[in-house]
Amino acid sequence: MITVSENAQNYFRSLLSKEPPGTQIRVFIINPGTPSAECGVAYCLKSEVEESDIQLKYNQFFIYIDKNIIAYLKNSEIDLVYDKLGSQLTFKAPYAKCNILNKNSYLLEDRVKYFLNMEINPQLSMHGGKVNLIKINQKNGTAIIQFSGGCNGCSMIGMTLKETVEKKLLASFPEIKKVYDGTEHLHGQHSFY
């Protein structure tokens, strides 16, 4: 899963020695399985440990990882690299941006978020815009989305909603019956049209 070099382990021990007792390390991925996935390392207080976390034991400290991102951390490495300018902590996770979702075993929300990031947002980004899933009401099949950037307040948003986002979501996800725009649109300099 994760290889933590001896140099990185020593670095973590040094950092943790200056923190309140019980502070550990958390490894995380923001937006796993998408082109915008970002890996990170942070402090983890006792009160921040979740039931869904996996605990990896090292000499004098633990690393906590949400079990839902384990597959994205395959063959990942954390190292402390030294060069002429000093040292830098590196985190390489080759599968962080890969779509490893199994269509039948992951939440509908995860699959829709991935779809929006892969199929819709590249088109919207050409106009400085983006769409995010806020939530899905599974009782009535309504997906609530929110536009940002150049899409917020754009005069063409109605067409973008119906002809791009809703049409593609309904065709790809039979569980979704309607797409609702939950954006508080404010036209301004950021708006594309």
Image (cartoon, grey):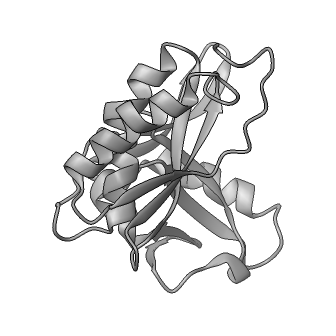
* Horizontal and vertical percent position of residue 110: 37, 59
Q: Is residue 135 above or below residue 33?
A: below
Q: Nearer the viewer, residue 184 or 5?
A: 184
Q: Is residue 125 above or below residue 3?
A: above
Residue 15 in view: yes
Q: Within the image, what quadrant is residue 26 found in? A: bottom right
* Number of disc labels: 0
Please state, as top left, top right, bottom left or bottom right, where the N terminus lies in the image. bottom left
* Horizontal and vertical percent position of residue 35: 39, 33
Q: Nearer the viewer, residue 57 or 148?
A: 148
Q: Looking at this rendering, what residue extends furthest in the bottom direction?
A: 51
Q: Within the image, what quadrant is residue 25 found in? A: bottom right
Residue beneath the point at 40% across and 21% down: 123
Residue beneath the point at 63% across and 49% down: 11
Q: Is residue 15 above or below residue 107?
A: above
Q: Is residue 172 left or right of residue 3?
A: left
Q: Nearer the viewer, residue 57 or 135?
A: 135
Residue beneath the point at 72% across and 82% down: 47
Please state, as top left, top right, bottom left or bottom right, where the C terminus lies in the image. top right
* Horizontal and vertical percent position of residue 30: 52, 49
Q: Is residue 63 left or right of residue 13?
A: left
Q: Nearer the viewer, residue 30 or 190?
A: 190
Residue beneath the point at 71% across and 55% down: 14
Residue 96 in view: no
Q: Is residue 188 above or below residue 77?
A: above
Q: Is residue 27 left or right of residue 193?
A: left
